[in-house]
């Protein structure tokens, strides 16, 4: 992202759903002054900063990301790219996974899986679009974000979350990051193994009336809750 800033001025941006992007500063004449790389610790929202601080304060920690899309944004991105944090990254959309592979081919600390993840591992109806960005097992989500685009329904097998955790030896893991277009709380409440930190998108879960039960469930498990916009962080006390 490029911007022109007068002397004494300052430019800032927040993460939200935006890609990580460098910021380049120029004079009015177009002379390049400097380029600064986007940094979660400086530029992220409060949950993104907290997530990065957690990973920095716990070197060697590892986590599971489900619903990574193409890997261009998410609280976990900076720790995975800059801190070498070990991540098991899972994306259900075939199109998004193809781009994810391209984006993360050079990161040996990241294991990439193209699976649809559910609690029980049953066959599911997968709602998908040409872009694959809002693919989900939850009906009605894709239509909200890709108006005018065709939404297709296809049946696919899924993998049980706890089976994946055992298969890859993640029974003792540190964080779980979810962006599942409304299926986040279902997966959380189906866990057999609980990390110290959970971050999930709350927007669609609230709309579906599933959020409050999940929050009560997490509090009973000993988590403290921090909300920030469309995301919620649960931290083990």
Image: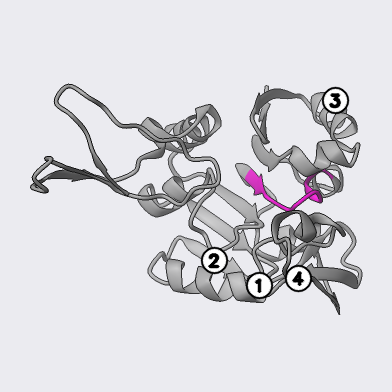
Are the residues tagged 3 and 4 within 8 Å (C-beta)? no
C-alpha span from label 4 to label 1: 15 Å
Q: What element carries label 1?
A: loop
Residue 77 visible in rendering? yes
Q: Residue 225 at x, y = what percent?
A: 71, 24
Q: Nearer the viewer, residue 232 or 128?
A: 128
Q: Which residue is drawn at 11% across and 48% down?
A: 30
Question: Is 215 drawn above or below residue 140 in the view shown?
Answer: above
**Residue count near mark 2 (Cα–Cα under 10 Å), binned few <14, some 14–19, many ≥20:** some
Q: How far across and how far down the image is residue 61, in percent?
A: 51, 44
Q: Name the residue under label 1.
A: 114
Answer left or right for 167 relative to 151. Answer: left
Which residues, given as a range, are shown in magenta?
Answer: 176-185
Q: Is mark 3 on a helix, strand or loop?
A: helix
Q: Quadrant of residue 167?
A: bottom right
Residue matched to label 2? 111
Depicted 79 relative to depicted 125: above or below: above
Q: How crowded is mark 1: few (under 14 residues within 10 Å), some or many (20 or more)?
A: some
Among the two numbered marks 3 and 4 on one chain, the one whose residue lies closer to the N terminus: 4
Q: Tell me the SS state at disc 4.
A: strand
Determine which of the numbered discs, if any, sits on residue 64 in the image.
Answer: none
Disc 2 from disc 1: Cα separation:
10 Å
The residue that label 3 is drawn on is 220
State the residue at coordinates (81%, 68%).
127
Q: Examine the rendered structure and indicate whether residue 150 appears above or below residue 64.
A: below
Q: Do the residues labelled 2 and 1 touch (CB within 8 Å)?
A: no
- Residue 168 colored in magenta in the image: no
Pointers 3 and 1 in contact (C-beta within 8 Å) = no
Look at discs 3 and 1 and give the one toward the viewer.
1
**Depicted 121 relative to depicted 76: above or below:** below
Pointer 4: what residue? 128
């Amino acid at each position: 992202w490029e911007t022109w800033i007068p002397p004494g001025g300052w430019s800032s941006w927040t993460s939200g759903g935006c890609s990580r992007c460098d910021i380049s500063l120029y004079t009015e004449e177009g002379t390049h002054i400097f380029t600064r790389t986007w940094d979660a610790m400086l530029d992220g929202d409060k949950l993104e900063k907290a997530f990065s601080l957690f990973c920095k304060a716990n070197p060697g920690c590892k986590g599971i990301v489900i619903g990574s899309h193409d890997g261009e944004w998410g609280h976990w991105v900076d720790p995975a790219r800059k801190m070498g944090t070990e991540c098991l990254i899972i994306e259900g959309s075939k199109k998004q996974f193809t781009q994810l592979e391209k984006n993360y081919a050079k990161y040996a600390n990241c294991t990439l899986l193209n699976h649809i993840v559910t609690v029980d591992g049953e066959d599911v109806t997968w709602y998908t679009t040409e872009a694959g960005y809002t693919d989900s097992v939850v009906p009605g989500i894709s239509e909200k974000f890709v108006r005018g685009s065709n939404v297709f329904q296809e049946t696919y097998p899924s993998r049980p979350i706890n089976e994946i955790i055992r298969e890859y030896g993640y029974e003792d893991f540190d964080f779980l990051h979810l962006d599942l277009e409304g299926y986040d709380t279902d997966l959380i409440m189906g866990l057999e193994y609980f990390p110290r930190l959970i971050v999930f998108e709350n927007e669609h879960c609230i709309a579906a009336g599933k959020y409050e039960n999940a929050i009560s469930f997490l509090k009973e498990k000993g988590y403290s809750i921090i909300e920030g916009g469309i995301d919620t962080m649960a931290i083990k006390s």
